[in-house]
C-alpha cells in the first residue's frame, strides 16, 4: 500500500462523530475522524511498513500519525527519527500512540527517561513506563520501585491527564509481583485522593486498589 492509497482509505473511514470525539480528547486538526478499531483493521492489512509509516507521519494528519505508530518498524527507526517524531507531537492521543511504539524500540530506556524529563512529553514518558511494566523486559524490580517513589512524590503536581496515566502505571507495576504489589498499595495509601478533571469526556480516574486486586484475582484464576 502506498501513501496515496492509505490516505484515501483513512479519508473514507473517517466520520464527523468520531472526529468530534477525538477533538473532545484534545486531538489536533487536521484529521478525518477514523475509529481506533478501523485503524487496527487497516494496520493488520499493512502489517509493518516503515517507509509508509514515515510518509504517514509527515502528512501531519492525526489519523495518519496514529496509523504510522502502528505500522512503523521498531527495529528500523533511528534515534534521530524518533526524536523528530516526538518533537512534532501535537496532542496527547498521538503522544500515547508514539509511546506504545517507542516502548518496543531498542532505545526504550534512553527514550523513556528523556521523555520523563521533558515537560511536554511527560505523559508519553509515563505511558512508556506503563507499557514496559506490562512486558517487563526493560523494567526490573529496582527500577519499578524507583518509579513508584517518583509517582508518589510528583502525582499531585503533575498535569491533569498525566496524573491519570501515572495512576495506571502504579496499578500496572502493582500487578507484577508480590513485592511490587505491597509497595504499590502502600504508595496508594500515602498518596490519597488525586484530583482529576475529565473535561468533556467519559474518562474516569481509576480506583487503584480494586484494580490491583482484580489483576491478582486473574493471576490466581489462571494459575
Image (cartoon, rainbow, N blue to C red):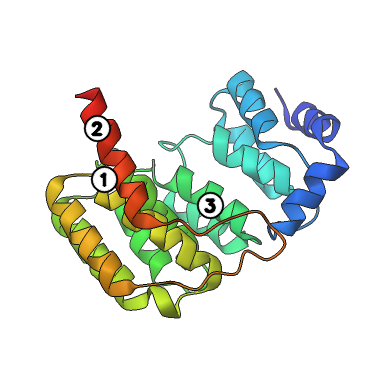
Query: Quadrant of the rendered structure where residue 50 is?
Result: top right
Is 167 situated above or below 8?
below
Identify the disc placed on residue 84: none
Measure the C-alpha gap from mark 3 to mark 1: 21 Å
Image-based side of 111 in relation to 44, left or right: left
Q: Earlier in the sequence, mark 3 or mark 2?
A: 3
Give the farthest residue toward the bottom: 157
Residue occupying the point 12% across, 52% down: 179
Q: Secondary structure at mark 2?
A: helix
- Residue 149 screen position, x and y as percent: 24, 70
Q: Nearer the viewer, mark 3 or mark 2?
A: 2
* 189 on left or right of 27: left
Say if 44 sits above or below 157 in the image. Answer: above
How much space separates mark 2 and mark 1, taking CA atoms? 9 Å
Q: Nearer the viewer, mark 3 or mark 1?
A: 1
Query: CA–CA distance between discs 3 and 2?
Result: 27 Å
Q: Which residue is mark 1?
A: 175
Which badge, 3 or 1, is on the more N-terminal residue?
Answer: 3
From the image, which quarter does the N terminus lie in?
A: top right
Q: Which mark is residue 96?
A: 3
Residue 219: mark in rendering: 2
Amino acid at each position: 500500500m502506498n501513501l496515496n492509497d492509505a490516505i484515501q482509505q483513512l479519508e473514507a473511514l473517517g466520520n464527523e462523530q468520531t472526529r468530534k470525539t477525538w477533538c473532545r480528547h484534545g486531538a489536533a486538526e487536521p484529521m478525518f475522524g477514523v475509529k481506533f478499531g478501523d485503524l487496527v483493521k487497516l494496520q493488520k492489512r499493512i502489517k509493518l511498513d516503515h517507509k509508509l509509516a514515515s510518509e504517514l507521519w509527515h502528512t501531519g494528519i492525526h489519523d495518519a500519525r496514529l496509523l504510522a505508530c502502528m505500522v512503523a518498524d521498531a527495529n528500523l527507526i533511528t534515534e534521530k527519527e524518533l526524536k523528530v517524531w516526538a518533537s512534532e507531537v501535537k496532542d496527547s492521543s498521538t503522544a500515547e500512540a508514539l509511546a506504545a511504539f517507542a516502548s518496543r524500540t531498542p532505545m526504550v530506556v534512553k527514550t523513556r527517561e528523556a521523555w520523563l524529563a521533558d515537560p511536554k512529553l511527560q505523559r508519553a514518558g509515563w505511558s512508556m513506563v506503563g507499557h514496559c511494566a506490562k512486558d517487563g523486559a526493560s523494567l526490573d524490580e529496582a527500577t519499578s520501585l524507583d518509579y513508584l517513589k517518583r509517582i508518589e512524590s510528583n502525582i499531585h503536581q503533575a498535569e491533569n491527564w498525566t496524573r491519570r496515566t501515572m495512576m495506571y502505571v502504579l496499578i500496572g507495576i502493582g500487578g507484577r509481583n508480590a513485592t511490587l504489589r505491597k509497595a504499590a498499595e502502600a504508595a496508594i495509601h500515602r498518596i490519597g485522593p488525586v484530583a482529576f478533571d475529565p473535561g468533556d469526556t467519559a474518562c474516569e480516574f481509576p480506583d487503584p486498589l480494586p484494580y490491583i486486586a482484580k489483576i491478582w484475582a486473574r493471576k490466581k484464576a489462571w494459575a
